[in-house]
Amino acid sequence: MKDRNFTLPFYARASVFFVGLYVVVSILYITQGIVIPLIFALVISIVLHPVVNFFVKIKVNRIVAIVITLILTLAVIGSFGMLLVSQASLFSESWPKFVVKFTEIFNESVTWASGYFDISPQKIEAWVSKTKGEMFNTSGSSIKQTITSVGSGVVTLFIIPVYIFMFLYYKPLLLEFFHKLFSEENHSAVGEVINQVKTVIQRYLIGLVLEVIIIATLNSVGLLILGIDYAILLGIIGALLNLIPYIGGIVAVALPMMIAIVTTSSPINALYVLAIYYFIQLVDNNYIVPKIVASKVKINALVSIIAIFAFGVLWGIPGMFLSIPLVAILKVIFDHFESLKPWGFLLGDTMPVIDLFKLKLKTKRKS
């Protein structure tokens, strides 16, 4: 009897692939309460690892070095949070004035719409009241979900520092596990993948922090020049929303434009806000991202948008923030395995050169 290599037909392999993909996605969705904090902790621990190494090199005990690093990190995050809270409190004090002004603008809009479309103001107000009532009825059922999400978010904030400590402390154990997982001949390739993933995450996240600081400063200065209220709060919120590629920038400019319409004497200030934010986006896209948020791994725009929406559906807002780093890690892994290199090429932004002139010549010769 001769040995024959049995290969499944394409439709069978495709079925197995999609079933496996469905199972993996289902597991990730069901276990998101465990997986998301772990991924955030792993990413943050990779960024903090050089700081821990610095303290260890100056003869500080490893556990003490990790604790000091965590305390410094929490102090920076806490200071940033206090700044946001102080600015938000100023906004809440002016909220009644904001509501009054918005009501005036709404009434003027109703009057204009009734004259332009020849509809009585009573019908417009009745439609608005009906829509508002339906919205509140629909959102009433989601209040419990919101409270539950906030509660789970608070628990997550407390558990992430514990995970970070464990990842930093057990780093040698985890690295040795990955080496034991593969044969000795693959140890160098595994080490290269781990080092490249670490480099990608460190460069990407450190670059994002610098980008947030620069964009928040530019946003705040631009809004202050225009005399827009709550400029610092809106500038910081805009910089944070800008972390969500392609989508966050639209929301980031909409908020200050609404504030400009309501709180300033002339609606044209909203156009000035749009112009300033557009200029900042040009600076961000053409200088800050290429020069500061530069990474060894480049993800093309199509894959980035798909990843943002896919992880957003899977894990919500945390998934949107994690989408690009996770896709970048996948690309690093794909690029180091021969059978997966086509997928790594698909994720990248290297466009193949197609010589149309040669193609035209060939068609002419054939004719």
Image (cartoon, helix red, strand yellow):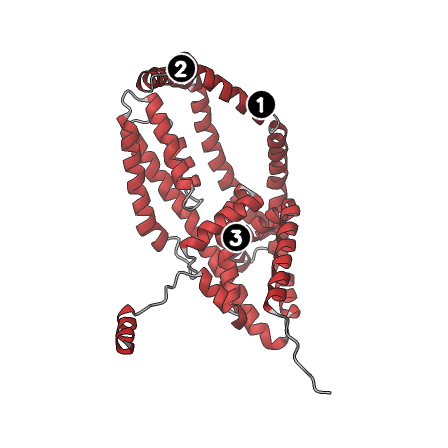
Where does label 2 land, which residue?
Answer: 100
The mark lying in front, picked from 3 and 1, is 1
Image coords of residue 162 (percent x, y): 63, 47
Between marks 3 and 2, how big is the CA–CA gap? 47 Å
- As displayed, is residue 13 above or below residue 279? below
- Please state which of residues 246 and 239 is positioned toward the viewer in this rendering: 246
- As displayed, is residue 48 above or below residue 238? below
Between marks 1 and 2, how big is the CA–CA gap? 24 Å
Q: Secondary structure at mark 1?
A: helix
Residue sticking out furthest to the front: 367
- In the figure, residue 225 lies in which quadrant? top left
In the displayed structure, does residue 157 sit left or right of residue 365?
right
- Please state which of residues 267 and 2 is positioned toward the viewer in this rendering: 2
Tell me the amino acid under the disc marked 3: Leu
- As displayed, is residue 264 above or below residue 327? above
Where does label 3 land, which residue?
Answer: 48
Identity of the residue drawn at 27% across and 76% down: 367
Where does label 1 land, which residue?
Answer: 137
